[in-house]
Amino acid sequence: MLKKFFSPIDMTVGSVWKCIVIFTLPMLIGNIAQQLYSTVDTIVVGQYASNGDNAIAAVGSALPILNMLLVLFIGISAGATVMVSQYYGAKNREALSYTVGNCITVTAIACAGLILSAIWFIRPVLELLNTPETIIDSCQDYLSISLIGIAGMAYYNILGGIIRGLGDSVSALIYLLVATVINIGLDIYFVAGLKMDVAGVALATVIAQFISSALCLFKLMRMREHFDFGWKYLRPRAQYVKTIIKLGLPSGLTQAIFSSAMIIVQSLTNCFGEQFIAANVVVMRVDGFAMMPNFSFGTALTTFAGQNVGAGKYDRVTLGAKQGTLLAVACSTVITGAILIFGKYLMAIFTDTAELVSLSVKLMRILAVGYIAVAVTQSLSGIMRGAGDTMTPMWISLITTVAVRVPIAYGISFLTRTAELPYGQKECIQISLLASWVIGAALTALFYRIGRWKNKRIS
């Protein structure tokens, strides 16, 4: 029974909604645990750093840049998940073996190249983004440590994606929970004990991510009943590397577009001062938890669609899209209500500053209803990606971020400028994000119904 609990799930048979829920629940818990990484970072620096509010602002200003550095690995992970799920559904052992091995090798090469090239540009980028002088040194410390340890973050995302692509969301959860506990302990030790401030939370996260990635690798090496693992499969083969890039590049570009928009908007956010930056960070921490069901259902539906497309069961994919989207929307509706009712108490966890709590609640309420729209976007995008259509979600992301979010944010800022508000209304950041979510949901639903994703199966 225990072995079955930690084994891959064949999602091509059985009740559709039960398959989705059984796969989603462990992943949801895992995503919540992963969100605890950054949330605990924020709480610890807010409570124990020498200048808590500035430390929160420093971590928040650094995260968009860190997310940009991780987009390459998010792309590899997305490509790996689609390939693994389809090859597993088609019972193609050889292709599955080469996919796993080539993903590991490509990630190693990408990590080395990124570290050698990006370390020199951290300070200039922070200066270009108008990062306040009071927090720029802390931002640089956080990013430098995170970049040096980026292999741990990269390999957890990619190896965890492979394990989930096989239908096993429980093992990835266990490994992440172990790493989360270690991360929390090290956060408190480094910041409260050793007084390392922002550098301490970065180091704690890096160590925890290396541990979780090592556990994922150990798990894969023991799954010989599903695929082969050895030096033969680690050697790059053009066929598989090209497919990883073909499927993963659009997802990586999607995240790159989103991260670029965040960086551009962060430049505007920085103009409003340290308190607004800190409030924005607090909002994003709560936002991270609110988004977890959406991301979890989206990933679950990617695996579900991949396995069933690999098995040629398209009617089952369509049914999964309907039932999975309804489940995601129901969860988001409950979360939206909770945010509107308990928002003040959630914000107070991060800071004792009354003005900061009040501003954070105001910003959070603007975003709350948008989570329902994101539920639709993530669910249907997951179906399209699992079927092999990673381009359509990329184009939708491009439209909603470049053509919607950034222009609306800067447009509202410009139109509401006064002598008292030289940069305009601060709420422009959240209003632009809400608009991009709603438009993204409408476009995703439209392109799902058009149905071009049904012709994208990997050959």
Image: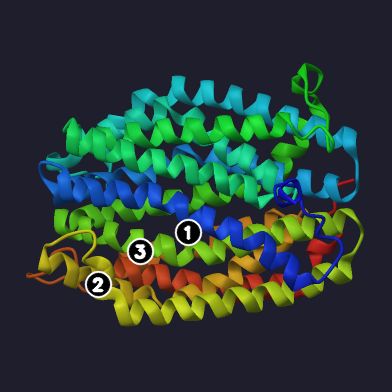
Residue occupying the point 27% across, 45% down? 59
Cα separation between marks 2 and 3: 11 Å
| Quadrant of the rendered image containing residue 230 | top right
Q: Residues within 10 Å of mark 3 (few under 14, many from 20)?
A: some
Cα separation between marks 3 and 1: 25 Å
Of the residues shown, which amino acid type is indicated by label 3? Val
Q: Which mark is residue 345?
A: 2
- Residue 20 shows up from this direction: yes
Of the residues shown, which amino acid type is indicated by label 1? Val
Residue occupying the point 42% across, 54% down? 261
| Mark toward the start of the polypeptide (1 vs 2) | 2
Residue under pointer 3: 286
| Mark toward the start of the polypeptide (3 vs 1) | 3
Q: Secondary structure at mark 1?
A: helix
Q: Is residue 275 left or right of residue 120?
A: left
Seen from this angle, which residue lies furthest front?
1
In this rendering, the answer to whether 131 lies above or below 209 is below
